[in-house]
Image: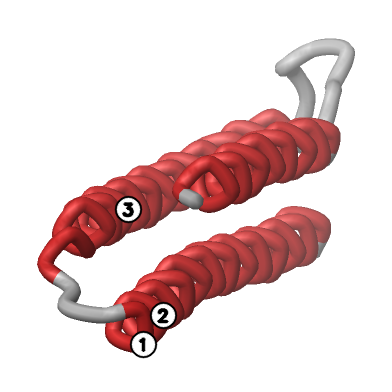
Amino acid sequence: MFDNVFESLRKATEETVHLQQEMLKKWVSFWPEFPSASGPWAGQVQQFQKKWAETVNDLLKRQRETAEAQFEAGLKNIDKAFRLYDVKNAEELRTKTSELWQQCFNSLRQAFEAQLRDCQTAMVKCVELMTKTAA
């Protein structure tokens, strides 16, 4: 019974890691490449790189916080799963199992929504930095 839950959580975690890797590849591709750091625009380049590094650092902090919250929710759900032995009958088991599944999926949904918001925030900051640097 729990094998399906753990398999679903494993797959969701793998997809989350894959999504994060793909997002990081995209973000790194936005980093401008310049032949040298001299010239009249060198200050703008350094300013852009500094702001972009701050943005990525903030994003990684939020990702860590999201991962910690997701891990904490997972631990709570596992604890609740092990407490299912207290049930008195099949109907109560069905109800509690259904509630547990709903909580697990809500936790995953919240984590994905937080990651999506962080990605959108990073893209907005990237566009802002690119337009400010170009101006």
- Left or right side of 19 for 92: left
The residue identified by callout 2 is 94
Crowd rating for badge 1 (residues with CA inside 10 Å; few <14, some 14–19, many 20+)? few
In front: 34, or 7?
7
User: Which amino acid does the dot numbered 2 rest on?
Assistant: Arg
Q: Give residue 43's quadrant in the image.
A: top right
Q: Residue at x 51, y 37 (%)?
A: 53
Q: Residue at x 88, y 13 (%)?
A: 35
Q: Is residue 32 above or below residue 62?
A: above
In front: 102, or 14?
102
The residue identified by callout 3 is 74
Depth-wise, is mark 2 or mark 3 nearer the camera? 2
- Left or right side of 99 for 26: right
Dot 3: what SS? helix
Q: How far across and how far down the image is residue 37, in percent?
A: 72, 17
Q: Residue at x 26, y 80 (%)?
A: 89
Q: How far across and how far down the image is residue 59, in percent?
A: 47, 51
Q: Looking at the rendered structure, which numbered label has been put on residue 32?
A: none
> On the rendered image, what quadrant is the C terminus found in?
bottom right
> Could you give the CA–CA distance between mark 2 and mark 3, rounded to whole angstroms?
20 Å
Q: Are marks 2 and 3 in contact (CB under 8 Å)?
A: no
User: Which amino acid does the dot numbered 1 rest on?
Assistant: Glu
The residue identified by callout 1 is 91
Residue 17 appears in the figure? yes
